[in-house]
Amino acid sequence: MQRNTLRNWSLLLGATVALAFPVASSAQLTKYDLEKTLNTEAHVGNLTGHAKDGAADYRRYCVGCHGELGDGNGENAVWIDPKPRNFQLGVFKCRSTPTGTLPTDEDLFDSIARGFDRSNMPQWSNLTKQERVDLVAWIKHFSPRYISDKAGTPIQIAPEPAVTPERIKAGRDVFARVQCWKCHGVLGQADGPSASTLTDDLGRVILPFNFHEGARPKCGDTDQDIYRIFMTGLDGTPMPSYADNIKPDEAWDLVFYLRTLMSQKSKEKDMAKTLGLKPVDPNAPAGQQ
Amino acid sequence: MSKRFTAVLSMVVLVCCAALILGQRVNAAGEGKITGTVKLDGAAPHMKGIDMSKDPYCSKAHASDPAHMEQVVTGAGGGLANVVLYLSEGYSGSPTVSTAIPVFDQKNCMYTPHVLAMDVSQTFKVVTSDQTTHNIHPNPNPMTGNVGWNQSQPPGAAPVEKSWKAPEVIPVKCNIHPWMNGWFVVVKGPYATTDADGKYTINNVPPGSYTVTAWQETYDKTTQKVTVAAGASATADFTFKAK
């Protein structure tokens, strides 16, 4: 009888505590929550990844930064910038899918191998494909988004046309029209008028990509990767999706123009030089470059 | 004698009560409404002016009418604008009441309205009236079930149509114009937003007893118990203390 009363009181106390901290309890997943998703799978090509099989590699290679619970709070996290990804949120920069949707398993698989230039995330191309797909399953098991949502449908990338001086010039007009320069600067030097005010979704200072300094874009540096970056946007950052406002043909023009801003040698750069192409004029009225 | 009187009296009371209850049942389909005014008690804090000189299009649009921040906007008699009122307890009807499509406009580099209320699953529309590029970037807490997105809207861009899954107060911003801050307030069931003078009307309220919550971006929430009779209009005025 007495024990029952005590139990009732402790239940009541427990309920009160739970009610008092609903935010704390829903904002952070526990080990107990994560046990429910241990059967998560990942599929890339004909490979199937199993979360449980990725656990050991995660503990060996990833936990130091991304943390045991995948919340990006590993013991090294305080020392590094950009901060490690919080997998619990299920928000990823490098996707082939539209803004606001989950990436495909292949997107995560590629990100692991590619690493992220100018960050502490190295290229894990030394891992076997099976190890990587198991890690993808383990990464997915951290986020409740993977219970309720499926990956988005990848955006279509039109076949790449041949580079011509006309296309480079047209690309400059797209750069002016959608105002990439507001953040990236007219020369792509990350010095646009809004560049110094940018923050990511967690309120941390973030810089726009600087085309000029020889860096590789974080989500890949093939022409297709660059096309994908501005069409899908980089979720969690200020970079929006332009899928609704740049047509596939214009997108290729823009890719070619962006190559002219990069410091790496390219045929686009040579063509722009021959053309004597000038940077966009931020003060020109809309449509009059 | 007195015993019989008590018995008769209690019978009368019982019959009256039954009639009253039955009468209400008969009219239960008639929806009522809740109206009132939300006021600020005390002087409204100073709203900082906005320096839009980094984008000449924006600063030109405000050349004769300087823009100010909008965390606290008051009108006639201290009425508070942009307060969202909704039924936080006691409502068990459909979570999506309104079929209207609320519009969130980017106009002169400001959000109009500053606060857009809507139901879960209700479609809303983001449009741009500006000749400068905006990016519309709501930032919900992913743990609520809502998922953020980030879309560009260059001059002349088509509207963006979206909806939210779960009730939440979601901040929305434009990264290109860092002063642009607004709110999507997603609720379940009937809701209203106060006008420039703090007045509001929540329509389509079924008869019953409710907790009405008033949300304001700076002063957070305050609640009140309100009972709505069938087809009738109940009044609930709210006051936030100025800080």
Image (tube, helix red, strand yellow):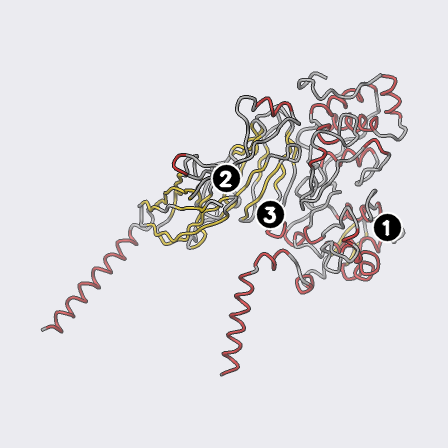
Front residue of A274/B16: it is A274
Coordinates of residue A32 in the picture (x, y in percent): 67, 65
Q: Are marks 2 and 3 in contact (CB under 8 Å)?
A: no
Q: Is residue A191 above or below residue A137?
A: above
The part of the image, by quadrant, that contains residue A131 is bottom right
Label 2 in the same subunit as label 1? no
Q: Which residue is mark 2?
A: B45
> Could you tell me residue B27's position as x and y percent?
29, 50
Sequence-first disc among 2 and 3: 2
Q: Which mark is residue B146?
A: 3
Residue at (23, 57) in percent of width and height: B19
Query: Which image quarter: residue A229?
Result: top right
Q: Nearer the viewer, mark 2 or mark 1?
A: 2
Pick the front one: A265 or B57: B57
Could you tell me which residue is drawn at 55 percent across and 40 percent down? B183
Amino acid type of the residue that numbered disc 2 sits on in the rendered structure: Pro
**Residue wearing tag 1:** A124
Query: What chain does badge 2 belong to?
Result: B
Residue at position x 50%, y 36% from top? B102
Real-space Cα distance between discs 2 and 3?
32 Å
Q: Is residue B90 above or below residue B151?
A: below
How far, Cα to Cα, is label 3 from label 1? 32 Å
* Circle 1 chain: A
Q: Secondary structure at mark 2?
A: loop
* Relative horizontal placement of residue A62, taking residue A288 as reference (left or right): right
Give the mark toward the camera: 2 or 3: 2
Local packing at callout 3 (Cα closer than 10 Å; few below 14, some 14-19, many 20+) is some
Three-letter amino acid code at disc 1? Trp
